[in-house]
Amino acid sequence: MRYRVSAEAQEDLLEIFLYWRERANEQTADRIIDSIVERFWLLGEYPSAGKSMDEIEQGLQCFPAGTYLIYYRASKNRTDILHVFHGARDQNQAFEE
């Protein structure tokens, strides 16, 4: 595995899961989480695939996963998954929170 999921990103995923489980059902929530997590491998293998988000924080990158955005930072040895936010949110504010 060439990526690591931060505690903050794990919390984001839990919040997304709980949101969709409440509004739809557990199977829908699982599918959404799976579709996001599938991208982690891609970012671990191809860390330059994302868009630079230096305007939020130096070295930060972003990659879409459906309606969600994965924020990460790539280093020489691995990709650190930092946050996962819904794309409709104010991204600057979400990252600061």
Image (cartoon, rainbow, N blue to C red):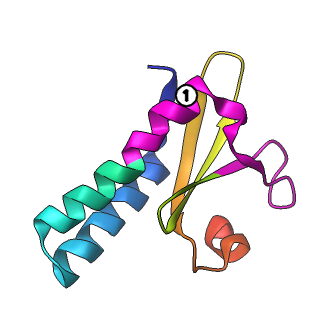
Q: Quadrant of residue 45?
A: top right
**31 left or right of 88 in image:** left
Horizontal and vertical percent position of residue 19: 28, 76
Viewport quadrant of the C terminus? bottom right
Residue sticking out furthest to the top: 77
Which residue is at a point 81% across and 42% down the rendered structure image?
Answer: 59
Q: Magenta region: which residues?
A: 37-62
Horizontal and vertical percent position of residue 95: 65, 65
55 falls in the magenta region: yes
Residue sticking out furthest to the bottom: 23
Q: Is residue 87 above or below residue 32?
A: below
For disc 1, the neighbor class at 10 Å (few under 14, some 14 to 19, many from 20) is many
Q: Is residue 92 above or below residue 35?
A: below
Residue type, label 1: Gly
Which residue is at a point 60% across and 30% down the rendered structure image?
Answer: 79
**27 left or right of 85 in image:** left
Q: Is residue 13 above or below residue 67?
A: above
46 falls in the magenta region: yes
> Does dot 1 land on a helix, a strand or a loop?
helix
* Residue holding disc 1: 44
Horizontal and vertical percent position of residue 50: 69, 45
Horizontal and vertical percent position of residue 69: 56, 60
Which residue is at a point 81% across and 53% down the rendered structure image?
Answer: 57
Q: Quadrant of residue 31?
A: bottom left
**11 left or right of 68 in image:** left
Which residue is at a point 63% across and 44% down the rendered structure image?
Answer: 72
Viewport quadrant of the N terminus? top left
Q: Quadrant of residue 27?
A: bottom left
